[in-house]
């Protein structure tokens, strides 16, 4: 059961991250297109890749990852850091969707420097996740709060910042 879930998780991550790294190279092609038919074909390809391949892969990667957390009971500091990098992939996914919405409006473009930056930053995030998963360091070079490696710890850590938090009254 665990091996099958790991396979699904790794396959979904591979598909998701490959798409996040590769899509910016399609965006750059927008500038070279002059006719409406080619522009429509590029837009259709990009939207199909995002909505029918990347987004389901992202959902499957996250869902299978959550299932693996419960199957393996992983509560170690490196895993918390890994989840932080996965959150960055989620941010990159959302930003990719926003770029797609804006990119095909009249007069829009996607500069090559942005393509390079998005590709490099996404690849570095994926590399960081891969290194953390393969190395599984017992300690981290930076000290994370102990609450981040405990179930429910983040809530305890952030509860004092919650303006709607109900604290017991200290008056007699």
Image (spheres, grey):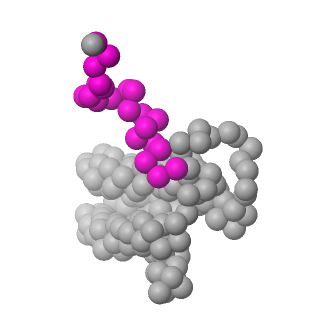
Q: Is residue 136 visible?
A: yes
Q: Is residue 103 visible?
A: no
The residue drawn where x is 55% and y is 63% is: 74
The residue drawn where x is 32% and y is 50% is: 98
Q: Is residue 148 left or right of residue 104?
A: right
Residue 123 in percent (x, y) is at 60, 59
Residue 103 in percent (x, y) is at 33, 52
The residue drawn where x is 47% and y is 52% is: 151
Give, as a single range, the part of the protein colored magenta: 150-171
Residue 154 occupies quadrant: top left
Q: Say if the magenta span includes residue 74.
A: no
Q: Is residue 13 left or right of residue 40?
A: right
Q: Say if the magenta span includes residue 163.
A: yes
Which one is nearer the viewer's eye here, 82 or 71?
A: 71
Which one is nearer the viewer's eye here, 71 or 3?
A: 71
Residue 75 occupies quadrant: bottom right
């Amino acid at each position: 059961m665990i091996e099958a879930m790991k396979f699904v998780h790794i396959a979904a991550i591979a598909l998701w991250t490959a798409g996040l790294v590769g899509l910016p190279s399609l965006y750059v092609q927008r500038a070279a297109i002059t006719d409406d038919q080619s522009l429509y074909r590029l837009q259709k390809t990009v939207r199909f890749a995002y909505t029918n391949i990347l987004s389901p892969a992202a959902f499957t990667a996250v869902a299978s990852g959550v299932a693996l957390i419960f199957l393996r009971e992983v509560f170690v500091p490196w895993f918390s850091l890994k989840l932080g990098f996965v959150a960055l992939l989620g941010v990159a996914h959302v930003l990719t969707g926003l770029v797609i919405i804006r990119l095909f409006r009249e007069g829009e473009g996607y500069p090559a420097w942005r393509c390079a930056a998005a590709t490099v930053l996404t690849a570095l995030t994926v590399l960081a996740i891969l290194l953390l998963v393969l190395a599984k360091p017992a300690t981290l070079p930076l000290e994370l709060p102990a609450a981040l490696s405990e179930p429910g710890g983040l809530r305890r850590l952030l509860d004092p910042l919650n303006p709607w938090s109900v604290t017991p009254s200290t008056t007699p």
